[in-house]
Image (spheres, helix red, strand yellow):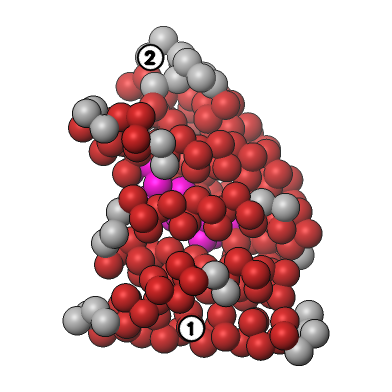
């Protein structure tokens, strides 16, 4: 696609569709195209961040946009962040984390929708999308040395992860959350020692170790190793 289409010329149609509040289907199609462009361009999508990201953030900040459109925007935001993580974090980290933090709170409000299966399914999908989005952002934080900005969001993020595994006690959820917790440990170092050393983290990893799936066991073992390393460094007064 990158070789056959002039993205700069094609972009004006994408931006127009992204801003179509009265046509959610058109917006979702445009969001999907953004994801496809990101995959086609790889790290070269970095040159279009200033055009693409503001439109996605605008969708996520708009209370009137359809929740399915917002879910698609979260997924694509993660795709773009994955391919251009350092630049994304340098320019859009704070705004993105603020929006994601608010979405984390919403995604765990299951008690408010106990009798609404459609909303519960949407909240489940939102929680999954958020964890998926934090993975490339965490890598981007490391690559761009943005740990100081990221640290301010750790209390709420770990609160979300703790709630997530209580709401959805599932091996796949445990695996994805464990991987993210280990990534956060590597990224933030001893600053997150109080969070990664909480009982719920170790209980989750122990449950994952008991899984019949070797991949789950390997994830737990790897996460335990990273967490123990950071906690030991913290206890020794390291950084």
Residue 22 position (above or below residue 93): above
Residue farthest along the front direction in this orientation? 199
Q: Circle 1 sits on which residue?
A: 224
Say if residue 60 shows up in the picture: yes
| In this picture, residue 69 sits left or right of residue 98 | left
Residue 222 forms part of the magenta stretch: no
Residue 131 position by quadrant:
bottom left
The x, y position of residue 138, in whole percent, is 60, 61
Tell me the SS state at disc 2. Answer: loop
User: Neighbour class for label 1 at 10 Å: few (<14), some, many (≥20)?
Assistant: some
Q: Residue at x 52, y 26 (%)?
A: 59
Marked residue nearer the N-terminal end (1 or 2)? 2
Question: From where the camera sits, is residue 55 visible?
Answer: no
Residue drawn at point x = 41 percent, y = 36 percent: 109
Magenta stretch, main secondary structure class:
helix
Q: What stretch of residues is rendered in magenta?
A: 125-137
- Which quadrant holds the C terminus? bottom right
In the picture, the disc for residue 23 is 2
Relative placement, left or right, of 30 versus 57 is: left
Residue 157: x %, y % from top left: 57, 53
Residue at position x 38%, y 14% from top?
23
**Which secondary structure, mark 1?**
helix
The x, y position of residue 196, in whole percent, is 57, 71
The quadrant holding residue 120 is top left
* Image coordinates for residue 238, horizontal then vertical, percent: 79, 85
């Amino acid at each position: 696609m990158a070789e056959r289409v002039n993205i700069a010329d094609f972009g004006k149609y994408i931006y127009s569709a992204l801003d179509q509040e009265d046509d959610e289907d058109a917006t979702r199609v445009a969001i999907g195209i953004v994801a496809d462009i990101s995959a086609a361009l790889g790290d070269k999508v970095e040159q279009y961040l200033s055009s693409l990201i503001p439109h996605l953030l605008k969708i996520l900040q708009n209370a009137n946009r359809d929740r399915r459109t917002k879910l698609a925007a979260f997924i694509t935001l993660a795709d773009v962040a994955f391919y251009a993580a350092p630049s994304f974090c340098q320019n859009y980290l704070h705004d993105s984390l603020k929006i994601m933090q608010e979405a984390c709170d919403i995604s765990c409000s299951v008690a408010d929708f106990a009798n609404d299966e459609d909303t519960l399914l949407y909240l489940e999908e939102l929680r999954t999308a958020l964890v998926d989005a934090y993975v490339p952002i965490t890598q981007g934080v490391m690559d761009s040395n943005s740990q100081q900005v990221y640290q301010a969001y750790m209390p709420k993020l770990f609160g979300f992860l703790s709630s997530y595994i209580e709401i959805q006690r599932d091996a796949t959820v445990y695996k994805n959350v464990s991987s993210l917790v280990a990534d956060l440990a590597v990224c933030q170092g001893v600053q997150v020692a109080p969070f990664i050393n909480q009982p719920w983290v170790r209980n989750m990893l122990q449950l994952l170790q008991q899984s019949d799936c070797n991949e789950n066991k390997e994830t737990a073992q790897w996460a335990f190793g990273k967490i123990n390393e950071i906690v030991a460094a913290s206890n020794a007064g390291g950084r």
